[in-house]
Image: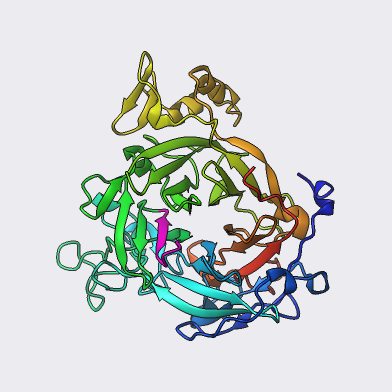
Amino acid sequence: MNKGVLSGVSLTLALALGGCGDGVKGSDGLSSQGSTEVTDIASICTPDNVSDCGMVLPYSVLRNDLENGAIPGSTFEIRNGGFGSDMDGHPTNPMQFYAITDRGPNANYTGEQGKGKVFPVPDYVPRIGLFEIQPSGDIHLVKTILLKDPEGNLISGLPNSAALGGTGETPYNAEGKVITVDPTRPYNSQTNPIKLDDHGLDSEGLVALGDGTFWVSDEYGLHLVHYNAEGVEISRINPFASDPRNIYSLPAEFGNRWANRGMEGLTITPDQQTLVGIMQSSLDNPAKHRSDLTRIVTVNLQTGKVAQYLYRQEQAQNSNSAIKALSATRFLVLERDGAFYHSNPDAMKHVYKIDISTATDLEAVTTAGVLKQDSVIGLTIEGKSLEQVIDANTQHADTSAGWQRLADHHIQPVNKVGLVADMVAEVAYPHDKMEGLWVIDGQRLGVINDDDFATWSSGDVLEQKYLDNSHSRIDGNTLYIVDGLDLSPQ
């Protein structure tokens, strides 16, 4: 789809401020405000209030004392912010939506214990925010729900232990020191080990259920966690069959996820019975693979029955960052690259409609001949995982031969019905991480970005995250509302 095809689509993008500035500082937390009498987004997002800037979400400042590596001699703001990993509409209030943060401010870092992440706010608690669109076009933070373990203790974004999804990453603080159990003493593997959190999440996918509870997916473990309305963990689902917290288990091959590219998208079917999750990228199944073969998994919450389908990306190593149900078999998928528009005008930020009804359920494939089910890597062809089959037939990034081999064995991916929205073509979408979708109604779609708490790094040095080469425009959570789309379940 190109801009000519979309020429008849009305993009009604309401702006919270008078221009494309850095955002508006607002309350971080627990205040609330009565619902506005305005109940139709169309009455706010009108042609007279159109802007390519979108609606900027409020933020507070977590800290502003660290040197800005992008502009020597200055400091930068770590903003909270961060509500862009995913979003979902409020089940009953059409003017409200939920948005979720990830694990907190972090960046790649290599220190004394090897590769890992720096956490400049190590006690940050992943959280869900409830937001309301005001008649003025502003967005108000109604309340914040901090995520907690089953005993009601606040969780963190620190890594899990190896048995429950840890990938061996080392957490460091802003001074480059290993984050340890006792922060007052130096790291020692025996007496003061690395601080881990088996309830910690890199939260990415969000489902707001009609009963007031939430399901959240995580891209490290990976885990699917059910939280009550106060953010307390109720139960979970993951690929680690020995985890006593599980009500059901995912197929073991999902434990072979590409680290930091686990389950970024999560939704539930309209009957609120079946969770549907999509992996961000290809699995390392059983070793490193970087192809266009990705997976969708469904879990019936009443029976635990699991189904699994293949999704073929437009290009290898893209990110499937959100999935939203239109029916029991049709969904929207947000597929993107990691490029900024200011440095790459061909950046890809697409939303597709897909249909799983004609796709092959890998869990239901009859094992015969060269087709076998392996307890570690899932369905195999001649002993090779499906990721290996694709890679073995790849030349110059063309995976067509591998996909044809799967088709020869009657293994079909989901059907991409069509491209629903191309945000770059329409608004020169400036953000790198378009990550959340909100199906407002049959023709309006909300789109939100992950701003990384306005924090970035280059060469292990922290800096402000900017949207332009002149370092004048700081990234921030921004809601775009796209009108005139076909979001019907047909």
- Which corner quadrant of the image does residue 372 belong to? top left
Residue 214 colored in magenta in the image:
yes
- Which corner quadrant of the image does residue 95 belong to? bottom right
The answer to whether residue 170 is left or right of residue 270 is left
Q: If the image is split into quadrants, where does the C terminus sit?
A: top right
Q: Picture coordinates of residue 186 (x, y %)? A: 24, 72
The answer to whether residue 64 is left or right of residue 22 is left
- Which corner quadrant of the image does residue 183 belong to? bottom left
Q: Is residue 353 above or below residue 31?
A: above
Residue visible at 52% across and 20% down in the picture: 405
In the picture as drawn, the residue positioned furthest to the left comes out as: 191
Would you say residue 393 is visible in this rendering?
no
Q: Nearer the viewer, residue 424 or 269?
A: 269
Q: Picture coordinates of residue 157 (x, y %)? A: 37, 65
Q: Picture coordinates of residue 433 (x, y %)? A: 59, 58
Q: How many marks?
A: 0
Would you say residue 192 is visible in this rendering?
yes
Q: Picture coordinates of residue 345 (x, y %)? A: 74, 53
Q: Nearer the viewer, residue 264 or 44?
A: 44
Q: Is residue 407 above or below residue 354?
A: above
Q: Is residue 319 above or below residue 293?
A: below
Residue visible at 62% across and 61% down in the picture: 440
Residue visible at 53% across and 21% down in the picture: 407
Residue 203 colored in magenta in the image:
no
Q: Nearer the viewer, residue 427 or 261?
A: 427
Residue visible at 27% across and 73% down in the picture: 153
The span picked out in magenta is 209-219
Q: Is residue 269 above or below residue 70?
A: above
